Image (spheres, grey):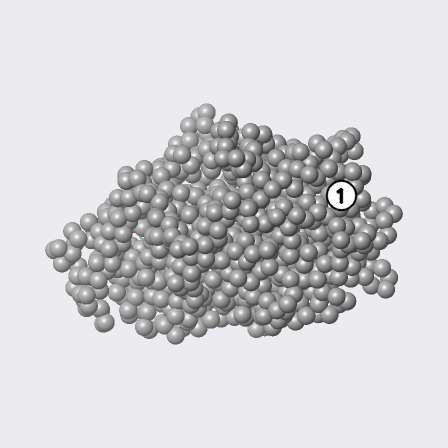
Amino acid sequence: MSIVTVQLGQCGNQVGQELFDIICSDAVEGQRKTYSTCSCERFFRQSSHGELTARAVLIDMEPKVISHSMTKAAKSGRWRYGEHSHFSQKQGSGNNWANGFCVHGPRHRDVVEELVRQEVECCDRLAGFMPIMSVAGGTGSGVGTYVTQCLRDIYPTSFILNHLTWPYGTGEVIVQNYNSVLTLAHLYQLSDAIVVHENDTVHRICSQLLNIKHISFSDINRVIAHQLGSVLQPALSADSHRVYSRNPVGELVSSLVCHPEYKLLGVCTIPNMPSSSIAYSTFSWPGLLKHLRQMLISNSKMEEGIDWQVRPPSGSGWPRNPTGGGSFNTSLANLLILRGKDVYSAETGGFEDPALYTSWLLPEQALTMWKSPVSFNKYEKSATLVSNSQALLRPLDDMVGKAWNMFASRAYMHQYIKFGISEEDFLDSFTSLEQVISSYSQLC
Amino acid sequence: MTQSVVVQVGQCGNQIGCRFWDLALREHAHVNKKGLYDEALGSFFRNVDSRNRDGGACGVGGRIQHLKARAVLVDMEEGVVNEILQGPLRDVFDSAQLLTDVSGSGNNWAVGHLTYGSAYRDQIVDKLRKAAEHCDCLQCFFLIHSMGGGTGSGLGTRVLGLLEEEFPEVCRIVTSIYPSAEDDVITSPYNSVLAMRELTEHADCVLPVENQSMVDIVNKIKLMSHGAKLGSMIRRDSTVISGQGGLSGPEKPFDAMNNIMANLLLNITSSARFEGSLNMDLNEIAMNLVPFPRLHYLVPSLTPLYTLADVSVPTRRLDQMFSDAFSKDHQLIRADPKHSLYLACALMVRGNVQVSDLRRNIERLRPSLPFVSWNQEGWKTGLCSVPPVGHTHSLLALANNTCVKPTFMELRERFTKLYRKKAHLHHYLHVEGMEQSFFSEAITSLSSLIEEYHQLDSTKARLIPDAPRLSIAR
Ligand SMILES: Nc1nc2c(ncn2[C@@H]2O[C@H](COP(=O)(O)OP(=O)(O)O)[C@@H](O)[C@H]2O)c(=O)[nH]1
Ligand SMILES: Nc1nc2c(ncn2[C@@H]2O[C@H](COP(=O)(O)OP(=O)(O)O)[C@@H](O)[C@H]2O)c(=O)[nH]1
Ligand SMILES: [Mg+2]
């Protein structure tokens, strides 16, 4: 089955390009025919000459980024974007969600839908859609939300998994919290699951784990692509009888999003290291999984600076954190993906502990496991956790809080009203996100 | 890529405009070694084949034939425009882009706004439309004018209204030259206040520049370049200091000042003209910096002015550039942003500067800069990879800051002094269509603008608690 990716705006088109690049180079490496065939079917169309074309539609309101991404792909020599699978205009959305959602989106609806339809027709079977975008700008956030809505209308039964990049806390777009709130509130009604990467977190991985001095967006995007790729590449699930699962998007959604109030998913992987060091390092499954588990429960998003004091609450009424460390991160559901050598010997009991989860789900319902003996992206062993937990509560709460403060003074409202978004629309979005915040904070 | 059109009105507008075109050409010549007409050039210039009689444009990618500025030049006397037509820039404009009269506006806003505004309305609209038709995606109009005279102030603000009427979706950024207290135009307070109301109501952004600060900056630069030790450190070919190496002939009195303003325009448009790793579209300026529609006065500061940039960029100097952008003596109006309140701030950087340099400096400077409670992280940044000629890097800061208030209050005071005695009023009231209500409404508009800044200022000392969040019924 195949996934149709829709890349939107600057961020979406840059992250998407890195994702296809990593998936392609991982798939074609070594002698692993079924893995590679399955991966290619998911992400690429193959011409009669064997050339790989990404199953992607590229959308932006200005031309530069798309042309840059297409050139980069073609230069790889391994894969490319479809010659006609892109649409751009001359002038961006100016950091204004309303401009993207109310003006650009509707204006170009037909063209975009047609491009998507053509891509869908090339799939033997469609697993679902993956729109990739940032939430802070104007095109990815506004047009991206609009396009997601169109997809939902036209393909009511298909899975839609949105990948979102959350902005740095400060720096690039002053109205970023407004744009983020509008995007998230709308997507919550449309999307089956929302996978989030925070730029601040990924930036820290680049500097502290990968030792990159001058960090560029390209460095950041490679980390995001690595994490996403390790989720989406072929793997075997418990009941798949040694056949690669057919629909990763559907299975991910059904195992992680069991309730429509909870669909924010965070991702972490282990290990992360400079590529020059990978060849000289060995890892043990117990070591990796012990770290990954602690990262989950202490909500540290990388393996450095983990708070080892945080423990799951014990049922017998003990205080939650006897040593006064950080607070415990409760999960609703987790998807653990292991790839590489000796994967069947890995002991995963630590993730089955009922104390990790809410009381209203049994651990066997809350934990899903995918495994693949094929190692991913040059790491001999690697583990990835996609979790529906409280991990994104803090950043979401910050985002909504800052936007709300600004809204209280009605600052910048006229810029949105100009394009047809009213104060009530804002209020609706705030209300629905406060609902999400409240739901996640009451998870225990 | 998008295009912009510069509309220069009156003596001051045209003189500054021409410095801009001169320096912009020089900058592109410096970067564009192949002589090909590219998207970057296309944002402010057309490429016209002279053999083609109707001035047919050549597409992007071909050789540079004749570059024509995307500009409309308006003046109600002939002197300045004629001088341009006899000077080295004459080929950059053709007669269809020009509009002149012979008798001037007599430093009277009403004559410019009403008399000429009505007489030339159709011709102006026609020229604006022509300029717009040459663009395949027109993003922005830049209006350059002075506040104190008659043509730039009166007719210039009339043109602003026409732009809004005719091209409501195209962004309007206005560079306005404010008169100094000792300005030789006696009626400049009237003209400025009358023009202010138009700016407040019809512009998307206004970049106020005060002639007095220009004079101060120019004097400091002179002092440094003549001082024995420091003089040797200033780069002679830097575009900030002089037009040397440009197309113009000998320097005139306003030249040094106008260079600074031309540089302001070069920097604000650089990210539209060149590549960069963090592009800042022109329509992002208002979106990020203007929280309330009337409060769109953005105080510019430009660095390095008399600091210097050598070939290599030691970190300390780069950081100095960021510090300077917030100091009092780098502001293009007399104002002290650090001791007032920021509503929002943009840093537009050119040259060899990385995202990490930006982050480091924002973190470093943030604690010393007061931001309004609801926009504590009100920073917008842009990186353009091409530095100005003669520098390795430069920074333009645009601050939406309550420090504009004293300038506006001073203007109001000067206005009131004249108005109380009804001095010179009859010159205005003689003009057909002009009524006393124009004066009273203009001063009311200015006063309420001042009051809005004042209200924001008064939140500065108070600790503003976060707005109580919506509560969710379970
Ligand atoms: N991770 C990542 N973030 C990006 C990239 N480009 C832009 N961003 C982020 O995206 C936001 C700006 O949105 P952008 O995608 O540029 O705007 P759009 O083109 O209007 O959708 C900011 O939060 C940036 O930090 C990228 O390549 N990678
Ligand atoms: N900075 C600068 N100010 C100017 C220039 N020419 C005139 N001014 C100022 O502009 C005001 C007079 O307006 P001016 O442009 O001459 O009148 P107009 O032709 O009727 O618009 C006064 O405050 C002058 O100091 C110039 O070239 N540069
Ligand atoms: Mg963009």
Q: Where residue A146 appears, x then y in whole percent? A: 55, 65
Residue B222 visible to an observer of this rendering? no
Indicate whether B368 appears above or below B437.
above
Question: Can you tell which quarter of the image residue B206 is in?
Answer: bottom left
Q: Name the side, left or right, on which B337 lies relative to B229.
A: left
In front: B175, or A274?
A: A274
* Vertical relation: A372 (above or below) A133: above
Residue A75 at what x, y percent from top left?
76, 52
What residue do we see at 36% from left, 72% from top? B121
Give the farthest residue toward the left. Answer: B421
Q: Which residue carries the number 1 mark? A: A339
Residue at 66% from the left image edge and 48% from the top image edge:
A364
Question: The disc numbered 1 marks a residue on which chain?
Answer: A
**Count of number-bearing discs:** 1
Q: Name the amino acid type tagged 1.
A: Arg
Residue B218, quarter of picture: top left
x and y percentages locating residue B126 in the rendered image:
44, 73
B169 over A436 or under it: above or below: below
Residue B367 in sight in this render: yes
